[in-house]
Amino acid sequence: MRNGKKRGRSEPGSTKKPRNKYSDNPPDFASLASLYPSFKPFVFFSGGRARIDWTDYNATRELTRILLLHDHGVNWWIPDGQLCPTVPNRSNYIHWINDLLSSEVIQSLGGEVKGFDIGTGANCIYPLLGASLFGWSFVGSDFTAVALEWAEKNVKSNPHISDLIEIRDSKVLPQSSSVPESELTIHEEAEISATVQSINLVDDNQTYTEPAVLLGVVKENETFDFCMSNPPFFETFEESGLNPKTSCGGTPEEMVCNGGEQAFVSCIIEDSTVLRQRFRWYTSMLGKKANLKLLISKLWQVGVTIVKTTEFVQGQTSRWGLAWSFMPTARKIIAPPVVKKSVLSFMLEGIKRQYSAVDVLQSVEEFFKSCGASCKLNSSTFSVDIVASDDQCNSISKNGITDVDSVRSYGYDKQSLDGSSLQVPEDNLSFRILVFQQMPGTLLIKGSLQQKDSPLSGLFSVVFGCLEESLKSKFCR
């Protein structure tokens, strides 16, 4: 609590928790251009819709500036080249944190909510959103001079919330930041040492060796409700610039670390084994779904009491959230009964450079057409609607990988994209396949049943698995 002000947390367990306003209402560029003349030069019309050039850094930065001002009353700016965050995507993470704090799984501590943003950057986006939306207090850490300078400027530009946010240099180590030795028994010291050594970051060549993350930055006896991080996703700066469709900037310090996001989050896990209950929740965002399995396995190895995951989807971009805690659970967690999944997904990683998301989308259509299924491709939503009979599904499952290249010789014509829906005969399997753009060289493929009570629903996972095998064999290195 600063300056004698006490900020209330969002109501625990409330069924009407504030949600991300952009989930169902994406920003209206035309309306924003009419309200903010500085944004107007970046807006153009195509196909009757107002758009911006996502490859123009100045356009994406100005959009972030006016969204923070228009929707959150926050003044904000960053210098050229610094990582420019997208407000809808970052709002997803903040709202998920609020869901975690409001849940009954971990007992509430009451009082002011205090968060720790690892690598807050020049943009300081998470503290600004958390303070303006929920009145949370924050410590935001970073280590470059530019990040520290501009994070401070962004905080001071908002006097209505500036008392809630502290910017901390992670190179200046607070005195005795870890658990005081006097509070540890010999047995606990040995247990922590063994635990830390057992984590074994990615491998000998992928160990995170950058400035301090939590240990060495968190002060003695300091406690927090949560920490959060948008870690460096890439192992090399060249890898971070492979996507020609977007321009969000970003310095090597913001985008890259040795071992990539897996090593960075492993370092947070390592620090959490020492700090333990000094944080109610430890969380991080991930750019690669494939990293979840390994990191979750590490978390159970170090003795956490609970692990939570989620998926953030905004437009054609998906990210994942990972959270864990060492706090005792407030109630017994009963696993839900096993049910047939109506939504499935997998990642295509290491896609060969000559292929794009459009190529993958067309191959999805060709895969199902090869067995005679009815398909409708929609290039604007990057989706394919499929209706398949029992025999067609069985044909896919028996034959395994379908030769999608041979489909073109069958003489199939593209179906009309006039918006008409496919007819679904009774007892047929109807589902939709979506292709989401991820980071460079990575796509998310998601499938969802349109008729969950179909008698063929049990075949959905088998058919989807065959599609995964086919696409990976063709497109991935």
Image (cartoon, rainbow, N blue to C red):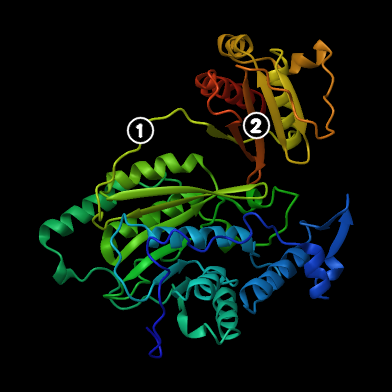
Q: The disc labelled 1 sits on which kind of residue?
A: Pro
Q: Which residue lies furthest to the front in this view?
A: 426
Q: Is residue 68 left or right of residue 205?
A: right
Q: Mark yes or no: residue 203 visible.
A: no
The Cα–Cα distance between marks 2 and 1, rounded to whole angstroms, is: 26 Å
The percent position of residue 254, horizontal first and vertical second, equals: 57, 62
Q: Which quadrant of the figure contains the N terminus?
A: bottom left
> 231 or 383: nearer the eye?
383
Earlier residue among tags 2 and 1:
1
Mark 1 crowd level (few <14, some 14–19, many ≥20, 10 Å Cα) = few
Q: Residue 433 carries which label?
A: 2
Marks 2 and 1 in Cβ contact (< 8 Å): no
The percent position of residue 65, horizontal first and vertical second, equals: 69, 72
The percent position of residue 238, horizontal first and vertical second, equals: 66, 51
Mark 2 crowd level (few <14, some 14–19, many ≥20, 10 Å Cα) = many
In the rendered image, which residue does mark 1 sit on? 337
Q: Residue 398 carries which label?
A: none
Q: The disc labelled 2 sits on which kind of residue?
A: Ile
Above or below for 371 versus 214: above
Q: Mark yes or no: residue 460 visible.
A: yes
SS of the residue under disc 2 = strand
Residue at 38% x, 90% y is 4
> 438 or 341: nearer the eye?
341
> 153 or 386: nearer the eye?
386
Q: Which quadrant of the figure contains the C terminus?
A: top right
